């Protein structure tokens, strides 16, 4: 049995990662900066470590012996913005870089086997119709969420070059699942439900997806010292075009038509980074991950999204019923 320490274990991907490690028989510790977070961790079988990622000096040296650490803090850890503007990305970049520095400090701990850092596909170049693999050049263009991740990516590359036992898990650009208030719900499902979202531009660009259960399982799968220094793409078997992605969610919501929105209008309403994210085209290959023996439970987004959205809406309705006065 290994002891795993997770930063971000209360989040959408983090919770699935924790559950996957527990299912493997590992002991899981999770960073919690509030009693509410600590209670949530306990409810899924995770032992809370009280502390704030922005004040590592208060808890990092007090950590018990751990075998592995995982950073799965996401872009929306501190809340969802009204607009994905360049100024918001710059603020996120500062926070994201601070988290990576803590992650690298964990990799320097005596006795630790390896540390997994979870990032997104935005760090790789747009290859058009060609597959993006772990050998594809890293992208340093300030565009979309890469405005957030670029400095952190450079720090990770430097850490690997130094010989630190760092593993890079590259999560898909869209992680989906039926949990209400997840990023999938807030960024895509609710806006489509309200008629506030549509296809951006011609919709022919490719979006890579992954079910949250598979993403959590994959992160747990590669939490292994033998993968130190490597990158792994986590993705469905079949990327979808942006138009397929948006219209499939809309159909699951019972809508028969989806509007097409020009890029300039989306930039005004949703922010420049939102346009850059929605129009980035990447066909991400999961071949390397699957070569390790990992198998997907949810290989195709288009086969899953209908049930996922309907399940999410039922869960939302149940939450409203529980919250209503008797």
Image (cartoon, helix red, strand yellow):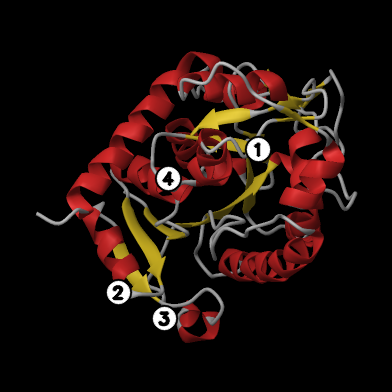
At horizontal 56% and vertical 34% (from top left) the residue drawn is 192
Q: Is residue 1 above or below residue 56?
A: above
Question: Does dot 4 land on a helix, a strand or a loop?
Answer: helix
First in sequence, mark 3 or 1: give its number: 3
Query: For mark 3, does the 10 Å Cα neighbourhood hold few (<14), some (14 to 19), or many (20 or more) residues?
Result: few
- The mark found on residue 17 in the picture is 4
First in sequence, mark 2 or 1: give its number: 2
- The mark found on residue 62 in the picture is 3
Between the C-alphas of marks 3 and 2, the distance is 19 Å
**x, y percentage for residue 96?**
67, 64
Kindly indicate whether the residue at mark 2 contacts the one at mark 3 (C-beta within 8 angstroms). Answer: no
Query: For mark 1, does the 10 Å Cα neighbourhood hold few (<14), some (14 to 19), or many (20 or more) residues?
Result: many
Question: Does dot 1 land on a helix, a strand or a loop?
Answer: loop
Is 254 in front, or is 59?
A: 254
First in sequence, mark 2 or 4: give its number: 4
Q: Residue furthest left?
A: 326
The residue pinned by badge 2 equals 35
**x, y percentage for residue 23?**
29, 39
At horizontal 30% and vertical 33% (from top left) the residue drawn is 314
Question: Does dot 3 land on a helix, a strand or a loop?
Answer: helix
The residue pinned by badge 1 equals 173
First in sequence, mark 3 or 2: give its number: 2
Q: For the residues carrying marks 1 and 4, which lies nearer the camera in this image?
A: 1
Q: Is residue 101 left or right of residue 262?
A: left
* Quadrant position of residue 203: top right
């Amino acid at each position: 049995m290994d002891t795993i320490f997770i930063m971000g274990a209360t989040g959408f991907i983090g919770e699935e990662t924790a559950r996957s490690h527990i299912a493997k028989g590992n002991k899981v510790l999770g960073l919690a900066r509030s009693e509410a977070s600590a209670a949530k961790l306990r409810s899924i079988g995770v032992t809370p470590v009280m502390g704030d990622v922005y004040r590592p000096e208060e808890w990092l040296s007090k950590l018990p012996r751990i075998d592995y650490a995982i950073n799965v803090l996401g872009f929306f850890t501190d809340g969802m913005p009204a607009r994905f503007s360049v100024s918001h990305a710059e603020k996120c970049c500062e926070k994201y870089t601070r988290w990576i520095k803590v992650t690298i400090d964990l990799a320097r701990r005596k006795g630790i086997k390896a540390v997994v850092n979870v990032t997104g596909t935005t760090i790789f170049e747009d290859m058009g119709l060609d597959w993006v693999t772990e050998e594809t050049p890293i992208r340093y263009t300030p565009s979309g969420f890469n405005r957030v991740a670029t400095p952190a990516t450079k720090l990770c590359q430097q850490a690997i070059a130094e010989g630190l036992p760092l593993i890079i898990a590259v999560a898909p650009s869209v992680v989906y699942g039926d949990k209400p208030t997840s990023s999938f719900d807030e960024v895509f499902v609710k806006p489509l439900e309200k008629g506030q979202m549509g296809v951006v531009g011609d919709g022919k660009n490719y979006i890579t997806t992954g079910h949250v259960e598979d993403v959590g399982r994959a992160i747990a799968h590669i939490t292994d010292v033998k993968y130190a220094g490597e990158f792994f793409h986590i993705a469905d078997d079949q990327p979808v075009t942006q138009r397929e992605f948006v219209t499939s969610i809309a159909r699951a919501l019972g809508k028969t038509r989806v509007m097409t929105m020009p890029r300039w209008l989306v930039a005004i309403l949703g922010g420049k980074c939102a346009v850059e994210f929605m129009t980035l085209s990447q066909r991400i290959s999961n071949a390397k991950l699957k070569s390790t023996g990992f198998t997907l439970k949810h290989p195709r987004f288009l086969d899953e999204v209908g049930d996922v959205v309907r399940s999410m809406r039922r869960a939302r309705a149940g939450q409203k019923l529980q919250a209503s006065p008797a």
